[in-house]
Amino acid sequence: MAFGLGRLHHVWSRQRRERIVMRAIDAGFSHLDVAPAYGDGLCESEVGRILGARRHTVTIATKFGIPCSSWGAKNELVYYARKIAGRLFSSTYGIEYTSRDFSASTAVASLEASLRRLRSDYVDYFFVHEPLGLDDLTAAGGLIDALEDQKRRGKILHYGLAAPTPLLIEAQRAGLEIGDATQFELSSRSTELLAAPRPNHSWFSYGIVRHLGGGDSNRRLEPLESLRWFFSNFPAVVPIMATNREGELSRLERAIMALH
């Protein structure tokens, strides 16, 4: 089971963040999903701090390609101040999410920064973070060679694409499949994506609650029934569940225990 930590930076208390991460691991989540763009490095740095010597008890996926600052990892107070000021006063707040940079040099620099924040000498999965279109991939000259080089060096164990299902299907048809892992947003077309066999390939899926809730990510669904539905339809895929509410985490923990 995988636990998504994209909203960890929404939790202002370091103690609460620590409780969430450790309870998720104790509940049976053995794979943690983060990215530099989640809190401008804050989520990665907090995972590194919280795990400490337990880092090797879990697998970690991080990503690259969405431009972001590193204020979340450098100084939490400055990060939150900038975030609040941006929302209140900046007409360009969030504009970084409208562009991507998947160049080889950016991939290597982002990986090195992620390793420092995670306090680790490797990441298990390194994903291209949600390209906006196929042009983002075709323009990334030298990327595969750079990722393969980092894999040979042992700094990444697996790499691939993280994107919505329709774009992944486009990439599949265009012969732009990358690496040995894929993280897809669950949709009505996801079975189409999985139809072509890819031996020794790892699959992860996010957006499960949003999909089952008809597009409403805040809709309250029963975790046990959601997970049973998911595993019956996608038995070879690892679901990524996410919450920053401790009550919801307790419900997920009970669901995982019931599945076993």
Image (tube, rainbow, N blue to C red):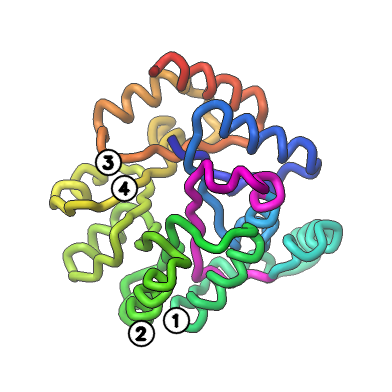
Instruction: State the residue at coordinates (43%, 14%).
Output: 258
Q: Residues within 10 Å of mark 4 (few under 14, many from 20)?
A: some
Seen in the picture, residue 131 relative to 31 is either above or below; the reply is below
* Front position among marks 4 and 3: 4
Residue marked by disc 2: 142
Q: Are marks 1 and 2 in contact (CB under 8 Å)?
A: yes
Mark drawn on residue 188: 3
Q: Which residues are magenta?
A: 47-69
* Front position among marks 3 and 1: 1
Instruction: State the residue at coordinates (39%, 31%).
Output: 212
Residue marked by disc 1: 103
User: On the picture, is 50 further left or further right than 192?
Assistant: right
Q: Amino acid at mark 3?
A: Ser
Q: Amino acid at mark 2?
A: Gly
Q: Amino acid at mark 1?
A: Ser
The numbered mark, 3 or 1, whose residue comes first in the sequence reads 1
Q: Amino acid at mark 4?
A: Trp
Q: Residues within 10 Å of mark 2 (few under 14, many from 20)?
A: few
Instruction: State the residue at coordinates (68%, 70%).
Output: 69
